[in-house]
Image: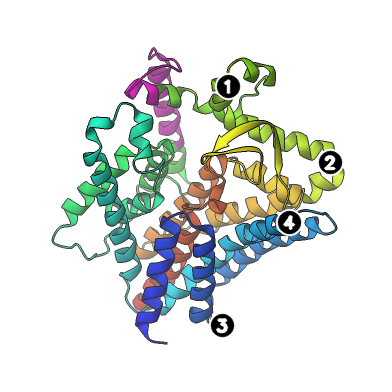
């Protein structure tokens, strides 16, 4: 197969992941996997793919005999199989491409294009920006391709297309990155910074890193909590209020009777609310639901209405909490394999070495596992469209092999 085919396939995969298209990224990943597959594969990538496949099989088995709409079942099948195909496609196609740096070039180029588009939208709308919510609407709530690009630009030495203008490209992506005002993106980049400095390997330095994180988090928490804000705050204070509410939004229980009086309270606790409703529904369905879930095609009954993407919903197929989402569809059994996938990625690459590239890739893979773990709390984990951790894991494992083969 000509190299240009592999390169186009990888480019399209990155593009469709970037535009949050589940269907197109799934189709592209299947195509890329089909053209790049080879019998020679890293045992770790195969084991990881098996773990994710088991989660999907459990969900499909749980659906057997239940009368869910066929289209809803099909959507869930694609939703749960897509991470497997993206993982394997990214791994095999990077192995097939002879260039060591092509994948890093594609990611940075794509991020640069999205950053320029984002900043252009802001510039032409300067007179209309009256809140941080409107500012975020100009580019979307987040863009993980820019996060991954900054990881490569800050924490790797790989050459890119922009050798002569690397600083300018970095500044543009950083500016766009900051103006998303995404707490998730900031935390992910910080995790990779810790990994780059060696604080995520399980040793004495790890304990020091944990101590620094706790002290920093405590200090920031005290500072932020003492800023006077409320739900009617405007401008930057509105962003601070959103940050202050983060923990409650994820975990705090909510009295549904309060929602009738003030629906703003619902949105402030939305993630906790929908997770509670999913767990209540599992509990009402009995032991089978707890063991293998409600199955593909199942919907979470919100017991209220919600406006999402311009439409009114009383049921939703997925929720923000990735752990509860997997639990709802595949039960405790599926959740165990989901967690095994993340923790295997973390512990398997806990190998500081003297070889620079081997050590670097181990650091980045360990950080990627924590990327998955954190995102599972806030944005459905790697099942969510537009999330790059599963892609990143595939290309890092493949790149690690390629650089090892050159050295040896």
Image: 258 above or below 213: above
* Nearest the eye: 213 or 325: 325
Whether residue 218 is in magenta: the answer is yes
Q: Nearer the viewer, mark 4 or mark 3?
A: 4
The residue singled out by tag 1 in the image is: 263
What is the span of residues highlighted in magenta in the rendered image?
A: 210-239
State how far apart marks 3 and 1 are (Cα).
55 Å
**Extreme front residue here?**
311
Q: Secondary structure at mark 2?
A: helix
The residue singled out by tag 4 in the image is: 59
Q: Earlier in the sequence, mark 3 or mark 2?
A: 3
Is residue 202 among the parts visible in the rendering? no
The C terminus is located in which quarter?
bottom left
Label 3 crowd (10 A; few <14 / some 14-19 / many >=20): few
Which quadrant holds residue 81?
A: bottom right
Q: Are marks 4 and 3 in contact (CB under 8 Å)?
A: no
Q: Are marks 1 and 2 in contact (CB under 8 Å)?
A: no
- Percent across and percent down for residue 296 are 72, 54
Whether residue 385 is in magenta: the answer is no
Which quadrant holds residue 364?
A: bottom left
Q: Earlier in the sequence, mark 4 or mark 1?
A: 4
Residue depicted at 45% across the width and 46% down the height: 200
Label 2 crowd (10 A; few <14 / some 14-19 / many >=20): few
Q: Nearer the viewer, mark 3 or mark 1?
A: 1
């Amino acid at each position: 197969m000509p190299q240009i085919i592999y390169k186009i396939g990888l480019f399209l995969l990155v593009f469709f992941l970037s535009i949050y298209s589940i269907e197109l990224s799934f189709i592209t990943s299947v195509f890329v996997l089909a053209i790049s597959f080879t019998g020679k594969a890293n045992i770790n990538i195969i084991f990881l793919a098996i773990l994710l496949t088991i989660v999907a099989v459990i969900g499909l088995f749980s659906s057997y005999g239940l009368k869910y709409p066929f289209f809803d079942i099909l959507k869930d099948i694609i939703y749960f199989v897509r991470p497997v195909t993206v993982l394997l496609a990214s791994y095999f196609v990077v192995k097939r491409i002879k260039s060591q740096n092509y994948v890093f070039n594609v990611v940075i180029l794509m991020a640069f294009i999205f950053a320029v588009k984002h900043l252009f939208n802001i510039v032409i709308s300067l007179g209309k920006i009256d809140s941080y919510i409107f500012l975020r609407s100009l580019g979307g709530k987040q863009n993980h391709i820019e996060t991954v690009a900054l990881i490569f630009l800050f924490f790797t030495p790989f050459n890119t297309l922009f050798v002569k203008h690397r600083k300018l490209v970095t500044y543009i992506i950083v500016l766009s990155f900051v103006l998303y005002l995404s707490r998730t993106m900031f935390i992910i980049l910080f995790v990779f910074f810790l990994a780059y400095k060696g604080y995520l390997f399980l040793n004495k330095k790890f304990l020091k890193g944990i101590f620094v994180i706790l002290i920093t988090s405590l200090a920031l928490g005290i500072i932020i909590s003492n800023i006077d804000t409320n739900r009617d705050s405007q401008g930057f204070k509105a962003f601070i209020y959103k940050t202050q509410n983060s923990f409650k939004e994820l975990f705090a229980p909510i009295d549904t009777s309060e929602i009738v009086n003030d629906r703003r309270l619902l949105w402030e606790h939305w993630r906790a609310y929908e997770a509670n409703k999913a767990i209540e529904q599992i509990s009402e369905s009995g032991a089978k639901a707890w063991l293998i879930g409600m199955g593909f095609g199942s919907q979470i009954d919100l017991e209220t209405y919600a406006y999402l993407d311009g439409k009114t919903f009383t049921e939703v197929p997925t929720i923000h909490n990735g752990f509860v989402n997997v639990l709802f569809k595949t039960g405790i059994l599926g959740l165990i394999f989901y967690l095994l996938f993340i923790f295997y990625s973390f512990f398997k690459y806990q190998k500081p070495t003297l070889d620079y590239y081997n050590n670097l890739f181990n650091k980045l893979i360990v950080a990627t596992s924590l990327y998955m773990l954190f995102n599972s709390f806030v944005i459905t984990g790697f099942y969510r469209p537009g999330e790059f951790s599963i892609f990143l894991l595939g290309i890092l494992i493949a790149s690690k092999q390629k650089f090892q083969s050159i050295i040896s």
